[in-house]
Amino acid sequence: MLSSLKRFFSPSAADRTVDSGRDPEHDIRIATCALFLEMARIDEKFTKEEMETVLSIMQEKYGLSREHADTLVAEADKELEDSVDLWQFARLINENYSIDEKMEIIETLWRMVYVDGKMDEYEHYLMNKLKNLLRLSQDQLIGAKLKVLNQE
C-alpha cells in the first residue's frame, strides 16, 4: 500500500520508474486499458464480446500477443480495483499522450460504447467525465462520436 501511495504521488512517469522500477510505457498502457475496462463495465453488463473487444484493442494498439494482452488486462483490472477514481489513469495519459493520441482513445471508447448498438446513461456519464479528465472539449468528444458512428 505504501508503495502505491508513493507511486501515486510521484511527480512524473520518469520518477515512477526510478522509484518503483516500473516501465512508464507499461504504466500508460495499463492506464489506457483501465479506461477501456471501466467503459466496458459501466453498464454492469460486462459481456464476453466486450472483453474480446478490449483484448483485441490492446493487441492492435500496442502490438501485443494474446497472452501479453491478457496479462495487461489483468494488471489494469487490479489497478482499477485498487483505485479510488479514474484521475490517476487520466493523469498518466495527459502527461504522456498528445491530443491526437487522446482523441484516438476517445474514439476507441466510443466504439466500445456502441458494441451493443446503443449508449446508456452510465456510458454517457462516463464519456463526459473522461472528456473532462483527458482535458478535451465537448466539440472534440462529439466529433469523435460522429466519426465512429459514420464508420459503422
Image: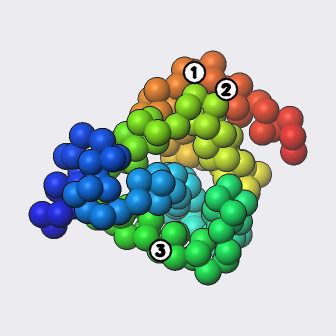
**Residue 62 screen position, x and y as percent:** 64, 59
Looking at the image, is 92 positioned above or below residue 147?
Answer: below
What's under tag 3, amino acid-wise?
Answer: Ala
Q: Which residue is mark 2?
A: 142
Q: Looking at this view, is 87 or 98 the one in front?
A: 98
**Residue 92 screen position, x and y as percent:** 40, 44
Disc 2 residue crowd, few under 14, some 14–19, many 20+, Cα 10 Å: some
Q: What whole-number distance in Å separates the C-alpha atoms at marks 1 and 2?
A: 6 Å
Disc 3 residue crowd, few under 14, some 14–19, many 20+, Cα 10 Å: some
Secondary structure, mark 2, is: helix
- Taking the image as drawn, is residue 56 in sight? yes
Q: Residue at x 41, y 60 (%)?
A: 23
* Tag 1–tag 2 contact (CB < 8 Å): yes
**Number of numbered discs:** 3
What's under tag 1, amino acid-wise?
Answer: Gln
Q: Residue at x 41, y 53 (%)?
A: 24
Q: Which mark is residue 138?
A: 1
Horizontal side, residue 88 vs residue 121: left or right: left
- Taking the image as drawn, is residue 128 in sight? no
Q: Which residue is mark 3?
A: 74
**Looking at the image, is mark 2 or mark 3 nearer the viewer?**
3
